């Protein structure tokens, strides 16, 4: 089960990696002495006061120079922060407050996360407090003097960090709970489907106020798995209640999609795929949500043994941008195969949250390149892919480091994406590939780190 993540940020050489290793208690001290060198985020597990969490180390943040890697490092920091519940801003107590620290602080203020300031290299017991006091000005509350090398003050730092973590049971629940949005045009059978879910009496059924006004979520449980059906108020119609026209509008569906892990895109098999269905499908893909295509009213469709394949082909032709999503033919009316929908939900969520090791990714890349060499320009410049690594989940996203992204056209990029899917699966979830330029000399310097991730 994924743990809450704490991002360690700061300018180069303040002692971030020394601190991470200290917090994680790892034996192998990994220290980088060259400022500004790109490195991948490294995740290490730590615990304190019976709380488990993950610390992620990011490259040194610099805002005031224009090296080629600056955007990359900042992007890594943003990615780290995006998945983190809080950040520790590390500064150097011996060097004192620098302009770069203030710039990072300014940037952090807009990131909407709790921040703890750790003033590192304060090994001197007399000077430590004074060294730390200088950083009050950053505006994140009391700066804590620590020494990552000696370990002093790191206990206090962990106390503060643990205090700021979300309650353990809550984060555990949020992780195990699966948010499901049932979306589709009016009359495709969403409320029938919802009733069919609820009618199966899977233990608790409780309405919970959602995050937006009037949004009501319903939690159901099956085989010890909880599903939060997002905004069921937008689906259910009560007789005698006038909801007004925009209540069932597409914006409501867009909001539900954003709050969900998985979308059940409900299609009426009698109507086929309409423009509205395509709009919803497009949004699901754009928002990076997992998806199961639920083809409803199968009971009412005339069929012989070959029809299901023909129908699937026709529907998929118009939903080509969801070609990764499984399709299930159901009848909300008779209950046929409705039971199977949540099985599919489990499968796609697992893929949505899946993490693949860097070595596996590079094996896939190696094979892909061997089958089809990257394109060469007329001037003889050839595209080179150095390595790839997974940067986030939900949806699984990968960064490919290459000599020059411009050398890789649409068709080669699609080819690599297909190879990823063929080798790694990821059925039911969109995946993202980011192509990043990297100079080979810099790459060699960073190589040991990259493969360590
Ligand atoms: P990062 O690049 O910001 O991750 O910083 P590092 O962890 O690589 O440390 C940069 C330098 O600061 C290294 O030479 C470390 O030995 C040194 N350093 C780290 N922590 C401390 C500390 O607590 N006290 C002192 N005096 N030096 C430290
Ligand atoms: P919603 O607007 O998407 O919530 O759709 P409803 O659930 O209200 O269903 C719209 C109409 O389709 C109703 O008349 C339902 O009885 C009918 N319907 C829903 N599911 C099925 C199904 O599986 N088979 C058939 N034949 N009719 C269905």
Image (cartoon, helix red, strand yellow):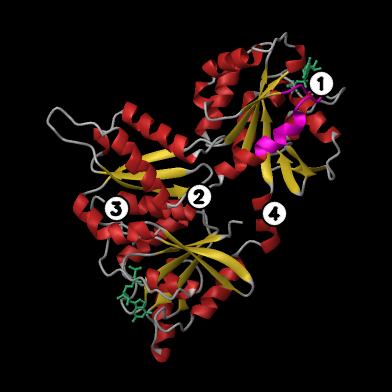
Residue span colored magenta: 330-345
Q: Which residue is drawn at 70% across and 60% down?
A: 169
Residue named by callout 2? 355
Task: Name the spot of residue 215 as percent of width and height, x first.
Answer: 72, 37
Residue named by callout 3? 70
Q: Is residue 51 magenta?
A: no
Secondary-structure class at tag 1? loop
Task: Name the spot of residue 203 as percent of width and height, x first.
Answer: 85, 44
Q: Nearer the viewer, mark 3 or mark 1?
A: 1
Residue named by callout 4? 173
Where is residue 376, by image quadrant? Answer: top left
Q: Which of 55 and 339 is in front in this view?
A: 339
Residue named by callout 1? 333
Q: Is residue 335 left or right of residue 43?
A: right
Q: Nearer the viewer, residue 99 or 70?
A: 70
Residue 215 seen from this side: yes
- Among numbered discs 3 and 4, the one appearing first in the sequence: 3
Secondary-structure class at tag 2? loop
- Among numbered discs 2 and 4, the one appearing first in the sequence: 4
Q: Which residue is drawn at 52% across and 16% down?
A: 317
**Would you call the spot at circle 4 few (<14 residues within 10 Å), some (14-19), or many (20 or more)?**
few
Residue 177 vertical placement versus 254 (above, below): below
Residue 189 vertical placement versus 200 (above, below): above
Q: Spatial distance from mark 1 to mark 2, Cα to Cα?
A: 38 Å
Dividing the image into four quarters, tell me where ligand 1 lies: bottom left
């Amino acid at each position: 089960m994924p743990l809450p993540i704490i991002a360690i940020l700061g300018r180069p050489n303040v002692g971030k990696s020394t601190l991470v290793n200290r917090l994680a208690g790892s034996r192998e001290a990994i220290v980088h002495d060259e400022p500004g060198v790109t490195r991948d985020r490294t995740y290490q597990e730590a615990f304190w006061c019976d709380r488990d969490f993950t610390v992620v180390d990011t490259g040194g943040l610099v805002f005031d120079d224009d090296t080629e890697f600056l955007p990359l490092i900042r992007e890594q920091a943003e990615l780290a922060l995006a998945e983190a519940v809080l950040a520790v801003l590390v500064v150097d107590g011996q060097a004192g407050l620098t302009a770069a620290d203030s710039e990072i602080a300014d940037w952090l203020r807009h990131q909407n996360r709790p921040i703890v300031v750790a003033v590192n290299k304060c090994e001197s017991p007399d000077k430590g407090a004074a060294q730390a006091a200088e950083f009050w000005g950053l505006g994140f509350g009391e700066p804590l003097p620590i020494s990552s090398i000696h370990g002093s003050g790191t206990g206090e730092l962990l106390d503060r960090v643990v205090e700021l973590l979300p309650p353990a049971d809550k984060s555990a629940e949020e992780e195990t709970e699966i948010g499901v949005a049932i979306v589709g045009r009016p009359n495709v059978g969403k409320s029938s489907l919802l009733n069919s879910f609820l009618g199966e009496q899977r233990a608790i059924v409780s309405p919970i106020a959602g995050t937006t006004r009037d949004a009501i979520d319903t939690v159901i449980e099956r085989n010890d798995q909880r599903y939060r059906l997002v905004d069921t108020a937008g689906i259910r119609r009560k007789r005698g209640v006038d909801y007004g026209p925009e209540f069932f509008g597409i914006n409501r569906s867009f909001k539900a999609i954003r709050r969900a892990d998985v979308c059940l895109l409900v299609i009426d098999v009698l109507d086929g795929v309409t423009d509205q269905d395509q709009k919803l499908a497009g949004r699901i893909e754009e928002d990076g949500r997992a998806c199961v295509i639920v083809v409803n009213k199968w009971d009412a469709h005339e069929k012989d043994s070959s029809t299901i394949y023909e129908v699937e082909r026709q529907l998929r032709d118009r939903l080509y941008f969801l070609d990764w999503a499984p399709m299930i033919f159901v009848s909300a009316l008779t209950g046929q195969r409705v039971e199977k929908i949540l099985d599919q939900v489990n499968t796609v969520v697992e893929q949505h949250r899946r993490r693949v090791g860097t070595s596996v990714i590079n094996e896939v890349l190696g094979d892909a390149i061997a089958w089809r060499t990257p394109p060469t320009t007329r001037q003889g410049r050839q595209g080179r892919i150095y390595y790839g690594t997974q940067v986030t989940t939900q949806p699984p996203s990968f960064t490919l480091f290459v000599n020059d992204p411009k050398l890789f056209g649409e068709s080669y990029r699609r080819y690599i994406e297909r190879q990823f899917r063929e080798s790694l699966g990821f059925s039911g979830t969109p995946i993202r590939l980011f192509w990043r330029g990297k100079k080979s000399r810099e790459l060699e310097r960073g190589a040991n780190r990259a493969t360590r991730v």
